[in-house]
Image (spheres, rainbow, N blue to C red):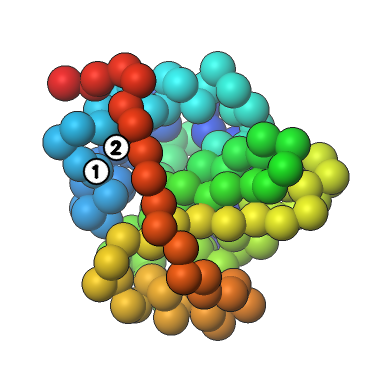
Amino acid sequence: MNWRIRAFRPQDADGVVALWEEAGLTRPWNDPRLDIERKMSVQPELFLVAGVPASADTDAERIVGTVMAGYDGHRGWLYYLASADDHRGQGIGRSLVAEAERLLHAMGCPKVQLMVRDGNDDVLGFYDRLGYERFTVSNTGKRLIADA
């Protein structure tokens, strides 16, 4: 394991956005840089990255994993869980979820949930293995601020 989990830093933004694009998490109606800015204004300590050294002669890191978490006083949520294609199978996603859960638990959070897009069976299987329970619910939403 040559990666480590830590809190997001502003200089990570380019690497985070590149990872989200590689993982297929970005959508035209959500500006990922605005999502990062918004997260940094609310519970920034719950935005985690996994980084690996970019090279032996520098302190720079390549971002190979991310997760955003949030707690609203009722339940916690996970968003933007991603790991780099060339680092899958190393436990990065599992470790990011575990650290987010640990931080949420320390805040008194009794339950954590997340949303998975329809048809993403591999991701559902990942969360099944982590002990997450599937629900039959309908999600609704309303955009208050248009990003584009």
The reply to whether residue 69 is in sight is: yes
Image depth: mark 1 or mark 2 in front: 1
Q: Name the amino acid type tagged 1.
A: Thr
Q: Name the amino acid type tagged 2.
A: Val
Q: Residue at x 43, y 20 (%)?
A: 37
The reply to whether residue 56 is in sight is: no
Q: Which residue is drawn at 81% across and 40% down?
A: 107
Q: Residue 75 carries which label?
A: none
Judge from the rendering whether residue 126 lies leftward or rightward of residue 142; answer left or right: right
Q: Where is residue 61 in the image (x, y as percent from the top left)?
A: 43, 41
Judge from the rendering whether residue 103 lies leftward or rightward of residue 121; answer left or right: right
Say if 33 sits above or below 111 in the image.
above
Mark 1: few/some/many CA within 10 Å (<14, 14-19, 20+): some
Could you tell which of marks 1 and 2 lies nearer the N-terminus?
Answer: 2
Q: In the rendered image, which residue does mark 1 sit on?
A: 26
Q: Which residue is drawn at 46% across and 63% down?
A: 137
Q: In the rendered image, which residue does mark 2 sit on?
A: 17
Q: Residue at x 67, y 39 (%)?
A: 71
**Quadrant hosting residue 16:** top left
Q: What element carries label 1?
A: loop
Image quarter in which the N terminus is found: bottom right
Q: Position of residue 31 (x, y in %)?
A: 25, 28
Say if 118 sits above or below 126 in the image.
above
Q: Position of residue 99 (x, y in %)?
A: 67, 54
Q: Do the residues labelled 1 and 2 touch (CB within 8 Å)?
A: yes
Q: Position of residue 40 (x, y in %)?
A: 53, 22
Judge from the rendering whether residue 7 lies leftward or rightward of residue 28; answer left or right: right
Q: What element carries label 2?
A: helix
